[in-house]
Amino acid sequence: MPTRGDIDFGQLAERIKAWGAELGFDKLGIAGIELDADEARLLDWLREGRHGAMDYMQRHGARRARPHELQPGTVRVISARMNYCPRETNDALEVLRDPLRAYVARYALGRDYHKLMRNRLQKLADRIEAQIGPFGYRAFSDSAPVLEKALARDAGLGWIGKHTLLLDRDAGSWFFLGELYTDLPLPVDAPSSEHCGTCTRCIDICPTGAITGPRQLDARRCIAYLTIELKSSIPVELRPLIGNRVFGCDDCQLVCPWNKYARPTREEDFAPRHGLDGAKLVELFGWSEQEFLRKTEGMAIRRAGYEGWLRNVAIALGNAPHSTEIVAALHARADDPSALVREHVAWALEEQQRKRTSVT
């Protein structure tokens, strides 16, 4: 095996990108680890309490912006991107416009990406090791305190849009990110320039006003946070704004002009499972816990938990037009063992009664 002094790191970087493409990544880039400006913004965001109940964000603090502290010896980050938008799925906007159907964020319709991305990154590390011998590294995919969007920006994979998501001129924003922290002094790529211009569609469309300004997100109002991360009661004033979104929200991506260039995924495992790209709300509300666990095995939806799932669907049912079928479904869970579910069912029943009264 060559010694470090014998390695042509420029050539190695090109090989790494070629290996990444062979492994199924849609793009790879290499970034340095200097994130001082991003760290300052992160700390301001935390001081303002915009992370809500995500206490782990506060615990990790600045460590998220310091790769060398998370993985000692790190000098470079290999950032990887993988498209997730399925080739064949019910039209997202049509599902959102149908209040009797459940909207699930497109990233969560198929297999949970975390293990898949980390396994691919491990295979990439194995190839590097086979070429140059042992080296220091650690693979991540939303699995540790990592400023993945800032690193991907610095690696040339895109710019951070006004909705705080990573955007690329050739691929939009429908992709996952993963990282390989490494001690290899690889040449870094040029960071991406920004191309949002004067467009504010993502800010204007946000159902709950969670995007408070360009690249400013208040998680406490974000539907993705409310339906996934928050484990307690969803604020009453935000419930009507959630509509039929039962797991996550894609509105800011759906209106983004750059997503006309989005490319469908090559991963069959990301295809929708169990009709969740447009299932009926009443049907989902009838799932037993065993059915929920069985049908969401290996999927990101598990993160909400069964109790959170019922809470979310109950809100969507409350937001739907009045119907005897919905009222019957809600009454069937009025005495649910979970106080959280009972609270949201009671609210949904009140909403259904209000709509019935306003019609008659």
Image (cartoon, rainbow, N blue to C red):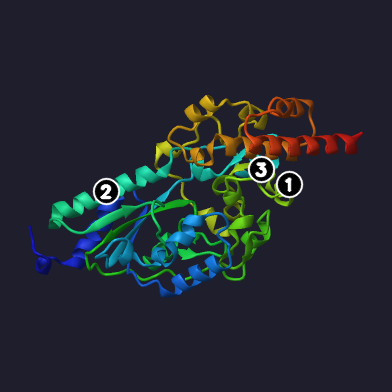
Query: Is the residue marked by circle 1 packed among few (<14), some (14-19), or many (20+) residues within 10 Å?
Result: some
Given the image, on which type of amino acid does mark 2 rest? Gln
As helix, strand or loop, the secondary structure at mark 2 comes to helix
Residue 328, x across and y down, in percent: 75, 25
**Left or right: where 358 falls relative to 43:** right
Residue 167 appears in the picture as rendered? no
Nearer to us in this view, 28 or 229:
229
From the top left corner, tell me how far across and down residue 112 is, in percent.
Answer: 43, 41
Q: Are marks 2 and 3 in contact (CB under 8 Å)?
A: no
Q: In front: mark 2 or mark 1?
A: 1
**SS for dot 1:** helix
What amino acid is found at the position of numbered circle 1 in the picture? Pro
Q: Horizontal and vertical percent for residue 200?
A: 64, 65
Whole-angstrom CA distance, mark 2 to mark 3, is 38 Å
In the picture, which quadrant includes the C terminus? top right
Which image quarter is the N terminus in?
Answer: bottom left
Asked whether, in this view, residue 351 is left or right of residue 213, the answer is: right
Q: Which residue is mark 2?
A: 122
Q: Which mark is residue 5?
A: none
Q: Earlier in the sequence, mark 2 or mark 3?
A: 3
Which residue carries the number 1 mark? 240
Of marks 2 and 3, the one in the foreground: 2
Instruction: Report the residue marked by disc 3.
Output: 96
Q: Between disc 2 and disc 1, whose residue precedes?
A: 2
Marks 2/1: CA distance?
43 Å
